[in-house]
Amino acid sequence: MQYPHYNPASDNRPLSDEELNDLDELLAALPTDAAMNVEALDGYLAGLLLTPGRQLAELPGEAWLPLVWGGDGQPDPAPFASGKQRKKVVMGVLRHLQSIALAWTHQPKAWEPIFSFADGEDEDEGAEYADAEDWAAGFLMAVDLAPEAWAPLFDGADTAALLAPIAALGGEDGALAEATAEARDAASRTIPDAMLALWERQRQARPPQIG
């Protein structure tokens, strides 16, 4: 199965909030536990855009798109009821990818990742805690596609601190797996600025992926 490449010059419109909710519901309704939710998808796409040394447009769609729904391989074929449903998911993913790239390029301070939020309890009633576990897990799935490219950033003096909260929240043995809501919230809220710092670093190293 071949899928479209990501084209940063395409005229794909970013998803509206309603369309993003529709995509999340469509992914949730697929008959597989391997499909990403929209939070993991958001992190995954961010990781793909930020992968060092590679333009996402150069990566065939079949190399990264099927991971969104758990793959197309055997013994578990793609979990779509029809080609139309598959196309709807693919186009939704491409449009959301475009929206991230556009925001980072033109309105970076207005960009917000998609995290879970939980209300505080007891004396913290009224507080709202961010939890980027699913987002970070999706980001790390993109890292796993190019571990050699990412290794210097996870170890680098100027980049390790930017990525540490993602590993702590999304890794299988992450340091924050059993942490308090306050600690997970604090780590989660460092991610937006970290992503923008990595995007700027990438922009200075090469032309951006979106016009």
Image (cartoon, grey):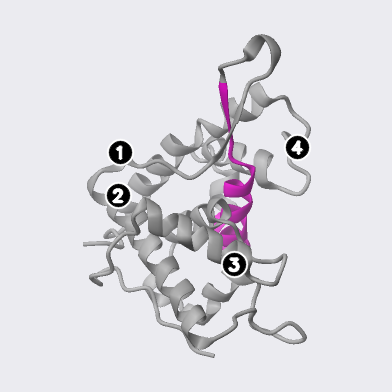
In front here: 49 or 74? 74
Residue under the point 33% across and 45% down: 200
Q: Which mark is residue 103?
A: 2
Q: Which mark is residue 132?
A: none
Q: Nearer the viewer, mark 4 or mark 3?
A: 4
Report the quarter where the N terminus lies: bottom right
- Residue 44 percent across, percent down from the top left: 53, 58
Residue under the point 64% across and 66% down: 35
* Sequence-wise first label, 2 or 1: 2
Q: Residue flagged by tag 2: what amino acid is it?
A: Ala
From the image, tell me which residue sits under label 4.
177
**Real-space CA distance between mark 2 and mark 1, rounded to the nearest whole angstrom:** 7 Å
**Residue 63 seen:** yes
Q: Secondary structure at mark 1?
A: helix
Q: Which residues are magenta?
A: 128-150
Instruction: Reply above or below: 196 against 46.
Output: above
Cβ atoms at labels 3 and 1 below 8 Å apart: no
From the image, tell me which residue sits under label 3.
145
Cβ atoms at labels 4 and 2 below 8 Å apart: no
**Real-space CA distance between mark 3 and mark 1, rounded to the nearest whole angstrom:** 28 Å
